[in-house]
Image (spheres, rainbow, N blue to C red):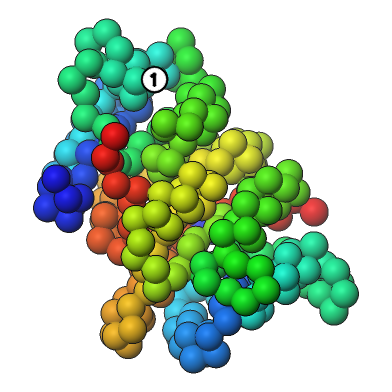
């Protein structure tokens, strides 16, 4: 059923400042059905450096999908989202907002900035894992991600 | 009404009557919490979204399933119009098409399609796709609420 990649792993960029959440997400994807490499950066500046292959990220792969927290140090997720979606080289990469914020304002603002979808993550472990599983089932197994045209 | 307590309004933009019927049946069979509205081309789709002509009482969709190849105005043009319209652009658009071409996939994402799915020809697979859309978009994801 995996129509996305065949045998090539999907590169996922997780932008998350909370080490606990990052570790949980990493483990959940490791146990998943779809071959993937999850890369973690801890703030918005790192995220953009990774995407633009600057500094220590000169060799970084281009992600097939980005999971973006909203509340981040240095440069927050809203700014990162706006920059990605305004950049002709990056905007086609799907960005899934994954945040604890349930604020209507954040949901609307994220979709207005062309987030590809918006998910609130749960503090409950089982629910958190269900969310990751749903992301995997939809984005990694059903959706055609943009081919890596490089 | 709060989105949690009502059906999800889905606009299906699809010109092929066979595919429309199949999609309706598959949505029903899947048990998805969705109410499907159907229009047959891009001009109708924009009229529906803007509540023009026969669509003055139309519901605002929570999500749009958009075919690419259609008469009059095709899906690429509809997508462009939706995503540059400040009143409409926040509505998630899932491209659902038989096209597997790289060009269509890239172009759709460049035009800010929320996701791109190639329509399976196999019925069981199509049912799986609809079920996954239901569990991701209607149960896990937060949709932009449809207050106008």
Task: Say whether residue B82 is visible.
Answer: yes
Task: Give the crowd class for mark 1: few <14, some 14-19, many >=20 residues within 10 Å.
Answer: many
Q: Name the image quarter holding residue B14.
A: top left
Left or right, B121 with respect to A17, comes to left
In depth, the one of B69 and A104 nearer the eye is A104
| Residue at (53, 85) in percent of width and height | A18
Q: Is residue A62 above or below residue B96?
A: below
At mark 1, the secondary structure is helix
In depth, the one of A73 and A14 nearer the eye is A73
Report which residue position mark 1 lands on: B46
Chain name for mark 1: B
Q: Name the image quarter holding residue B136.
A: bottom left
Left or right, A66 with respect to B114, comes to right
The x, y position of residue B127, in whole percent, is 26, 51
| Residue at (53, 47) in percent of width and height | A114
Q: Is residue A6 above or below residue A90?
A: below
The x, y position of residue B51, in whole percent, is 29, 18
Which part of the image, by quadrant, shows the N terminus of chain B?
Answer: top left
The x, y position of residue B132, in whole percent, is 31, 58
The x, y position of residue A102, in whole percent, is 34, 65
Which part of the image, by quadrant, shows the C terminus of chain B?
Answer: top left
Task: Say whether residue B29 is visible.
Answer: no
| Residue at (55, 90) in percent of width and height | A19
């Amino acid at each position: 059923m995996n129509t996305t990649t065949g045998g090539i792993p999907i590169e996922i960029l997780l932008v998350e400042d909370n080490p606990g959440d990052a570790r949980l997400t990493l483990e959940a994807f490791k146990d998943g059905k779809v071959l993937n490499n999850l890369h973690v950066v801890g703030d918005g500046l790192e995220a953009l450096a990774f995407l633009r292959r600057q500094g220590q990220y000169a060799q970084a792969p281009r992600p097939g999908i980005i999971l973006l927290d909203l509340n981040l140090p240095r440069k927050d997720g809203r700014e990162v989202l706006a920059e990605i979606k305004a950049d002709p080289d990056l905007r086609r990469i799907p960005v899934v907002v994954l945040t604890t914020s349930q604020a209507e304002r954040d949901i609307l603002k994220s979709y207005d900035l062309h987030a590809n979808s918006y998910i609130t993550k749960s503090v409950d472990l089982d629910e958190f894992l269900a969310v990751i599983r749903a992301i995997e089932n939809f984005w990694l197994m059903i959706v055609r991600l943009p081919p890596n045209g490089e | 009404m709060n989105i949690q307590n009502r059906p999800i309004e889905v606009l299906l933009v699809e010109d092929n009557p066979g595919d429309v019927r199949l999609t309706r049946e598959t949505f029903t069979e899947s048990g998805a919490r969705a109410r499907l509205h159907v229009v047959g081309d891009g001009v109708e789709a924009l009229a529906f979204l803007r509540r023009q002509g026969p669509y003055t009482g139309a519901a605002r969709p929570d999500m749009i399933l958009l075919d690419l190849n259609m008469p009059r105005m095709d899906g690429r043009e509809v997508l462009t119009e939706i995503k540059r319209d400040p009143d409409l652009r926040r509505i998630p658009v899932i491209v659902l098409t038989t096209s597997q071409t790289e060009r269509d996939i890239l172009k759709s994402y460049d035009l800010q399609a929320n996701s791109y799915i190639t329509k399976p020809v196999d019925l069981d697979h199509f049912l799986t796709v609809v079920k996954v859309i239901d569990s991701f978009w209607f149960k896990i994801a937060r949709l932009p609420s449809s207050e106008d």
